[in-house]
Amino acid sequence: MGKISGNLVSPVRETGSQNWVSFEQDTKVRYCLYARKSTEDDERQALSIDSQIKEMLESAQREGLEVVDVRRESHSAKSSGCRPVFNQILIDIKAGLFNGILSWAPDRLSRNAGDLGTVVDLMDQGHLKQIKTNGQSFTNSPNEKFMLMILCSQAKLENDNKGENVKRGLRAKCELGYRPGMTPLGYLNEYIGIKGKMKIFLDPVRAPIIREMFEKVAYENWSGRDLYRWLVDEKDFKTRTGHRFTISGILRTLGTPFYYGEFEYPEGSGNWYKGAHEPLITKELFEKVRANMAVAPKARPGLKEFEFTKLIKCGTCGRTIIADERFRKLKDGGMNRHVYYHCTQKIERECHEPPIGEEELIEQMVKLIDKMNFRKRSISDRIKNEILKYNRFSEVLFGNQYLEKEKVKSDQQNIRAYAKYVLREGTKDEKRELLTDLKTKLVLHNKQISLEDEKIINSVNKPEIDKQ
């Protein structure tokens, strides 16, 4: 790189900012060579920055021009004020560091009206004496400034037309049913074919799993966290780039209409198109997933209150036992609901306490009732009244013999008899209220329910009524 003065070449610094003393204002033109190339599609055919610098330095040497600095930049000139190197050149021209610009073509300087107006203003003010390009020269004369504005305006017109043509092409592609960009997970793009009409295929590996994700949310009320654990633990599912599927990615996938055969482009524009690809799911399934996701916070494990949540401890790690529900589609089109209780695993992530179904849990509790002691004084009046109604109902069915027989039973025995009835036939609130009156907590270990206090288990034959 060199400073060119006549036929002599002397070293010159190539830099983006200057700390040296300004040149004196005189009639001699001192040039700054500016080379720019954008990485965008519309400038792929332009000369590279190094080629521009080489060509213009050779031209400057032939014509005896003095080049005092070389600046290079890789930025688009579509918008004004967005090129830091070019903006610094305009500042340095005002400061008198140089008064001429050497560039490969006018469109290297500007493709927008803002930067072009600033350059012409510098010419009108006398700061910029000349702009030299490959085969053209522009000075502060009306005709040459007018020609510069025409050439730069033509570059802007071409730039705007290309933008419109791209948008028109994208709209035409959407109308044919092909969404621009990469397809969502579960589909594969065709890479050999007519540009703009390349087909989209179902991914034989990932598509079935994506479909199953929708079904689990729609029919089994799975949450995003449920799906994440299932994808990691059971499916070892990974994206096309080999990464794990994140929870946010799962939720984004479940909200993508592309899977039922439609898409919006651009997103948020309100312009909807019917895809030419094979739908992975039905629109009805997609809408059911959306409806379930809208109430997902209530259905997530640990947030929805089930009959026995927060009343049982994990026998492995000591954390609270929570529950979640599953829905399984029957052959006749109906749905079967199942509730499973399991450890929260909040601290001990490696806790492998197996889950237990609600029906099995209730049967174990019924068998354990005879070992349980309840706080008599804390039993609410409502439960007492229920026990009284239960006894009266039994009296009607079995007569006075039943009543005389029941009189010998203790209050705890009456409570236990009622507790068995509530566990099998009671409402959720009745079950929860009943178990909160236990003297000790229940523990779940290896799918078996037991009492936390071993002393109570050993004193089955010596039940005591709490007098507190």
Image (cartoon, rainbow, N blue to C red):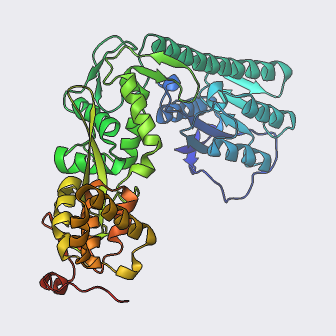
- Residue at position x 85%, y 38% in the image: 126
- Residue at position x 80%, y 19% in the image: 146
Front position in the image: 396 or 358: 396
Front position in the image: 126 or 24: 126
**From the image, which quarter does the C terminus lie in?**
bottom left
The number of callouts visible is 0
Quarter of the view holding residue 361: bottom left
Q: Is residue 51 left or right of residue 198?
A: right
Q: Is residue 163 above or below residue 217?
A: above
Residue 162: tell me if it is visible: yes
Q: Is residue 381 left or right of residue 91?
A: left
User: Residue 327: x and y, percent?
Assistant: 28, 40
- Residue at position x 25%, y 34% in the image: 212
Quarter of the view holding residue 318: bottom left
Q: Is residue 317 above or below residue 176?
A: below
User: Residue 450: x and y, percent?
Assistant: 17, 73
Front position in the image: 465 or 406: 406
Residue 46: tell me if it is visible: no
User: Residue 205: x and y, percent?
Assistant: 19, 31
User: Residue 162: x and y, percent?
Assistant: 58, 18
Quarter of the view holding residue 67: top right
- Residue at position x 33%, y 51% in the image: 225
Front position in the image: 17 or 358: 358
Which residue occupies the extreme bottom position in the image? 468
Which residue occupies the extreme front position in the image? 400
Q: Is residue 89 above or below residue 42?
A: below
